[in-house]
Image (cartoon, grey):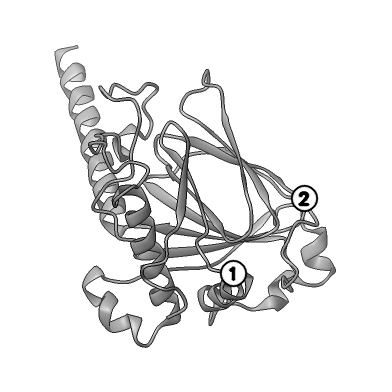
Amino acid sequence: ALLPRRWAMEVHHAGDGVLLVTRIFRDEAEAERALDALLSPQYDSSRFEGPQYERNPFSAFTQVYSRRWRHGDVERLREEDALVRTVSDVSDGLMRAVYGAGGVFADEPEDGCSEDHEGRPVCACTDTTPRLPRSTALNISECLCYRTRSRRGWHRDRNWITGLSFGCTVRMGFKRHDTSTPIELLVPSGCAVVFNGALHEHAVLEIQSGTAPPWWRHPFARCVFLLRDTRQSWRAAKRKRARTEAAMRAAREAAAVA
């Protein structure tokens, strides 16, 4: 395995449920092997080379692939698929570091904050700290590659995200509301940030050129793997459909009364 399944990661709570995960890999050699496993076989470096790519103002980032697999197939796929094995090991290590003995949230109850916050202006939860669901088992990997000096504006996603970053250090921002003071984090190569993408508006504020590890050989500045749990995505979509249908029913009833 690329990662020892009992390796102790370090998790730092930056505030409001946003986590910075370090010591994911034992050393830079293991980080490089993990990147190769996560990129292959979908990676084609020619997509990031040449004057057309350099001149394109809209290519701040490029999606290399998006892949998912069934939770029930993980143990079988681990033996033959380095990508699944790596994501599975990261997932296991992350949950131990968050909720295991001595974990950052080991003594805390799981909070109700989840994808329900998508599109809502305020959070009505009793405990205002959102926490990564205890049932999380990552089985989606989406790969994005960022060019040097690129940024990504403030946006939201539908569910919890573990963003595993390689290459240059990235400065990211997180905020729950427009009036909130943003949380800013520097995420070095080989580290990850975990947050509720539906609750927290987030942005890539800066990719710091010249900060990639010595072994970095890729034409882009940063590569991030957005790791998710399909069950959380499915539940988010289901709740969103229910809210839309309820709003449409209310609108029809109001129109009938009028």
The amino acid pointed to by label 1 is Asp
Q: How far apart, in angstroms, are the residues tagged by discs 1 and 2?
A: 27 Å
| Residue beneath disc 1 | 27
- Residue 114: % across, % down: 30, 39
Asked if residue 226 is positioned above or below residue 6 in the image, the reply reads above
Q: Which residue is drawn at 24% across and 48% down?
A: 235
In terms of image quadrants, where is residue 109? top left
In terms of image quadrants, where is residue 93? bottom left
- The label shown at residue 46 is none
Q: In which quarter of the image is the C terminus?
A: top left
Residue 168 as seen in the image, left or right of residue 96: right
Q: Is mark 1 on a helix, strand or loop?
A: loop
The amino acid pointed to by label 2 is Arg
Q: Quadrant of the N terminus?
A: bottom left
| Crowd tier of the residue under label 1, counting other residues whose Cα lies within 10 Å: few below 14, some 14–19, many 20 or above | few
Residue 69 as seen in the image, left or right of residue 163: left
In this view, the mark in front (1 or 2): 1
| Crowd tier of the residue under label 2, counting other residues whose Cα lies within 10 Å: few below 14, some 14–19, many 20 or above | few
Q: Which of 28 and 72 is in front in this view?
A: 28
Query: Which of the marked residues, 1 or 2, is nearer the chain's N terminus?
Result: 1
Residue 186 as seen in the image, left or right of residue 97: right
- Residue 61: % across, % down: 65, 57
| Residue beneath disc 2 | 149
User: Outermost residue toward the top?
Assistant: 258
Q: What element carries label 2?
A: loop
Q: Which residue is drawn at 29% across and 43% down?
A: 106
- Residue 156: % across, % down: 47, 39
> How many marks are shown on the rendered structure?
2
Q: Nearer the viewer, residue 100 or 95?
A: 100
- Residue 139: % across, % down: 34, 65
Q: Residue at x 50, y 35 (%)?
A: 201
